[in-house]
Amino acid sequence: DYEFYYFEQLRKRSRTWFLFRNEYLFVWPNVVIAEIPQPGHATYLFARPDQISRFTKMYAGVTREDVRKNRNDVASGLGFIARVARGRRTKRWLTDVLKHAGEKADYVEAFE
């Protein structure tokens, strides 16, 4: 059930990335992206913190549902920016992720 496209698009733009619990965290210049590259999961974007270790410690204590519902103001504390759902149009997903991350999409790459 692993969807390589999503992982690869995030990995190739990352400064670093690592496996965290059952998902990957990709560190980009302006954001941290949480991704489970399997069907039925969305991509979560957070403002890049000054200290990744502090972010991961806080993120380890919450669920994606906590973030979606902003339980105990956790989404705000983590710097939640957006949740990007995946569908059949992978290029639309990529364009949305890049937009929320403050990156420019290459026209050919995003719309081929």
Image (cartoon, grey):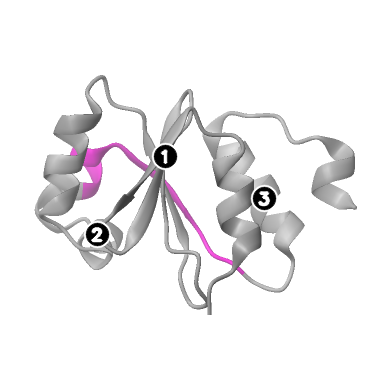
User: Residue at the location (61% across, 51% down)?
Assistant: 8
Q: Amino acid at mark 2?
A: Arg
Residue designated by label 2: 21
Q: Is residue 49 magenta?
A: no
Residue designated by label 3: 94
Tell which residue pokes out farthest to the top in this image.
50
Q: Is residue 66 above or below residue 54?
A: below
Which element is circle 2 on? loop
Q: Amino acid at mark 1?
A: Trp
Q: Position of residue 20 (x, y in %)?
A: 28, 52
User: Residue at the location (54% across, 64% down)?
Assistant: 85
Earlier in the chain: of badge 3 and badge 1, it is: 1
Which element is circle 1 on? strand
Q: Position of residue 76 (x, y in %)?
A: 23, 41
Mark closer to the observer (2, 3) = 2
Q: Position of residue 10 (x, y in %)?
A: 56, 45
User: Residue at the location (24% across, 59% down)?
Assistant: 21
Q: Residues within 10 Å of mark 3 (few under 14, many from 20)?
A: many
Earlier in the chain: of badge 2 and badge 3, it is: 2
Residue designated by label 1: 17
Q: Amino acid at mark 3?
A: Leu
